[in-house]
Image (cartoon, rainbow, N blue to C red):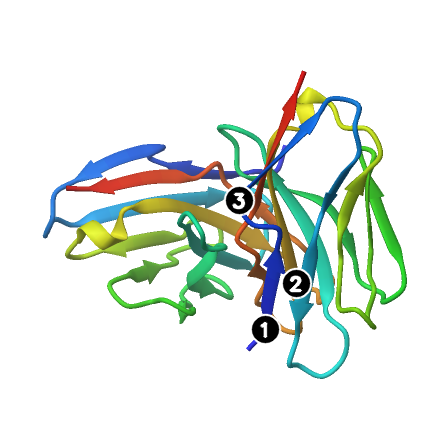
Amino acid sequence: EAAVTQSPRNKVAVTGGKVTLSCNQTNNHNNMYWYRQDTGHGLRLIHYSYGAGSTEKGDIPDGYKASRPSQENFSLILELATPSQTSVYFCASGDVGANSDYTFGSGTRLLVI
Amino acid sequence: GDSVTQTEGQVTVSESKSLIINCTYSATSIGYPNLFWYVRYPGEGLQLLLKVITAGQKGSSRGFEATYNKEATSFHLQKASVQESDSAVYYCALRAGGYKVVFGSGTRLLVSP
């Protein structure tokens, strides 16, 4: 069954440390996305990708980098984690069609202390 | 930019009673946006509940319905008789063109027995 798998499910990181969140999809979708979800906010787009080797900035990219080494994998990297990055992060994949929707992973809960 | 506003916070409904979660949108792009409702059950990622891509049409799934009202710029989610298993967080979303889906802040539904 096609799916989006995120790892880890939970992560505790120290301020100033490096954090990498991983996402793998078996949907063969070209587009992949990283969102964060905070109480009182909708999902906010951090980075997205159109395909292997491409990364684009979303609405809130500051403090984050992304990497898309293959069609299946899309990583979110926090080079210097800060407490303000404590959140739940969702990865999604989607097809290129204008009427397509997303398939989401189960989320990664990140706590930066 | 594009935005989605939905019923804030938590809604508590007794089992077998009716439900409405309000959603209104603002889309600045040319044309009519695609509209979605996603649902997030505890411990899981978001999953598509229903979508409507044509103004004036109604989408339905699992007993839920939403009608795309372009005059009122609304896409309210309704269900005639909720069950405990419907307890989840519901997100209204739109895609106004291109890659990006914009989400509302989410509404937590608690169905009491």
Numbered disc 3: what chain?
A: B
Residue A100 seen: no
| Number of residues whose C-alpha sits closer than 10 Å to that of mark 2, classed few (under 14), some (14–19) or many (20 or more) | many
| Number of residues whose C-alpha sits closer than 10 Å to that of mark 3, classed few (under 14), some (14–19) or many (20 or more) | few
Q: Residue at x 80, y 62 (%)?
A: B53
Residue carrying label 3: B9
Q: Where is residue A25 in the image (x, y as percent from the top left)?
A: 51, 44
Inter-mark Cα distance, 2 to 3: 20 Å
Q: In this view, does B14 lie above or below A61?
A: above
For mark 1, give the secondary structure. Answer: loop
Q: In this view, does B80 lie above or below B84?
A: below
Q: Which residue is drawn at 60% across and 61% down?
A: B5
Q: Residue at x 66, y 75 (%)?
A: B27
Residue carrying label 2: B94
Q: Is residue B17 above or below residue A39?
A: above
The residue lying toward the viewer, choosing from A61 and B80, is B80
Disc 1 to disc 2: CB gap under 8 Å: yes
Q: Which of marks 2 and 3 is nearer the N terminus?
A: 3
Name the kind of residue labelled 3 in the image: Gly
Q: Where is residue B7 in the image (x, y as percent from the top left)?
A: 62, 51
Kindly indicate the quadrant of the structure image that contains residue A34.
bottom left
Name the kind of residue labelled 2 in the image: Leu
B107 sits left or right of B31 in the view? left
Inter-mark Cα distance, 1 to 2: 8 Å
Disc 2 to disc 3: CB gap under 8 Å: no
Residue carrying label 1: B2
